[in-house]
Image (tube, grey):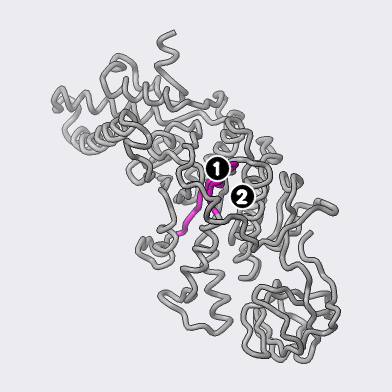
Amino acid sequence: MGIELAQSENGRLGRIISVSNLRVDIFLEHTDLGIRDMVYTDTDFGRVLFEVAEINGYVASAICFGLTNGLKRGMDIYKADGGISIAYDDSILGHVFNSYGHTIDNTEMGQVPTRNIYDKSLAMNEIIIDGDILWTGIKVLDFFAPMRKGFKMGLLGGAGVGKTVLIKELIHNVYQGLQSNSVFVGVGERSREGRDLYDEMKEADLLDKIAMAFGQMGDNAMSRSRAMYSGLTLAEYLRDEKKQDVLLFIDNIYRMVQANAEISSELAHMPIDNGYSPALLTEISEVEERINSTEDGSITSFQAIFIPADDLTDTAVHSISQHLDGQVVLDRKVAEKGLYPAINVFATNSKIIDPEIIGQRHFQLVEAALRCLSRYEELEQIVAVLGIDELSEDDRNTFFRARRLRNYFSQPMYVAEQYTGINGEFVEIGDVLDDVSAILSGECDDEDESSFAYIGAFMKYQRR
């Protein structure tokens, strides 16, 4: 597993002629070398690995996998067979890998089949664009931002708003509904947060349903950049070999862009806006185009995106957003009201909110719910100043129906049962539509708004 090392039959490939922070330049004695080939040299501290980034005649520039400490001019370079590869069988579940295919969770995997992380798995004629809708059982997501298999969803939210709990619940529900597994990719992730996620998955009994790849924040740019490719290869195994509908979580894809910018700077490329790599669009597209559906399985991704200086027009953010099919926004203001998942329904969207895809009834209810909740925000300010008695009867009905609706979209989570003492609920979309329709039509006006908080379906149990 990882990188297969074997000295070429031709012996030495070349020698180092310069060394910098991440990069070495190699004078080649043989020209049988390509971009992304692996090369290595041996030092007093052990074997040092590189990936070839550029070849200009008989000089190749390569990026180091770790530190360049101990390297000097004149050191011999050899070619490594196989390139970066990662485990490609059932043993990936329950393990944490680094960007180069080695486990970092104090476990050994032995000899298992591997695959190069750059191998593309799909031809254009294999890709299915009109996949089935992937219902998650989470009311607010299925109602306001339904997903198709193969969708790419942006996940925006800061610390402490329930992002990890939402991710764990999605993993649990997709496994429960589809018997499918998940992959988590930490790109530039803090090592402490990665450990927290590992421990939480283990505690929630979800570790054997997920494979993880981490390019940690303390690693160099090469590691942070290549974590995406390793994670994608793990997801492709589950889709192509296990025929599963996979959830892929990426946190944070913007850090891949930053890592590529560092590598580009090391190679002395002229940067574009904000110092990004001139190959920015290609680098993002290469990753995003591997997230697709086939007839047998799919990869549906949630991609956390850092917004630099809250600038949605930033070149990198815009380039990533072009590939997304929707976004889920977690809001601290919603979390402060004690409503989880703390999703801002006005900023959350999906491109399949279309009557021809989700049906006329669902589409009309989404519009009606957003109108009701939007009017509530206006009325809330009036009530704060003048009091509820100053509202008309219609506005008073809208005010209280919106509060019931807001509470209804909270939900007890399976993965939080031990903390809340409330059993988790998987809610079918048909029940969600019935409940929203009943709330908006006034059928539930006699019910106290508190009875809608942290429940599953409502009308189904009322009718019994």
Q: Nearer the viewer, residue 302 or 3?
A: 3
Q: Is residue 387 left or right of residue 76?
A: left
Q: Tell me where residue 391 appears, x and y as whole percent.
A: 15, 27
**Residue at which label 2 appears:** 184
Give the residue number, with chain letter if any, for mark 1: 167
Marks 2/1: CA–CA distance: 9 Å
Q: Is residue 58 magenta?
A: no
Report the disc number at residue 120.
Answer: none
The residue under the point 34% across, 28% down is: 405
- Which residues are drawn in magenta? 291-306
Element class at badge 2: strand
Residues at marks 2 and 1 touching, judged by CB atoms closer than 8 Å: yes
What percent of the width, then of the height, locates residue 257? 51, 67
Quadrant holding the C terminus = top left
> Looking at the image, is 160 positioned above or below residue 60?
above
- The image quarter containing residue 251 is bottom right
Dot 2: within a 10 Å radius of its alpha carbon, few (fewer than 14), some, or many (20 or more) residues?
many
Position of residue 22 relative to residue 200, above or below, is below
Which is nearer the N-term, disc 2 or disc 1? 1
Disc 1 crowd rating (10 Å Cα; few below 14, some 14-19, many 20+) is some
Amino acid under disc 1: Ile
Q: Residue 207 at what x, y percent from top left?
A: 69, 41
Vertically, is 194 above or below 453? Answer: below
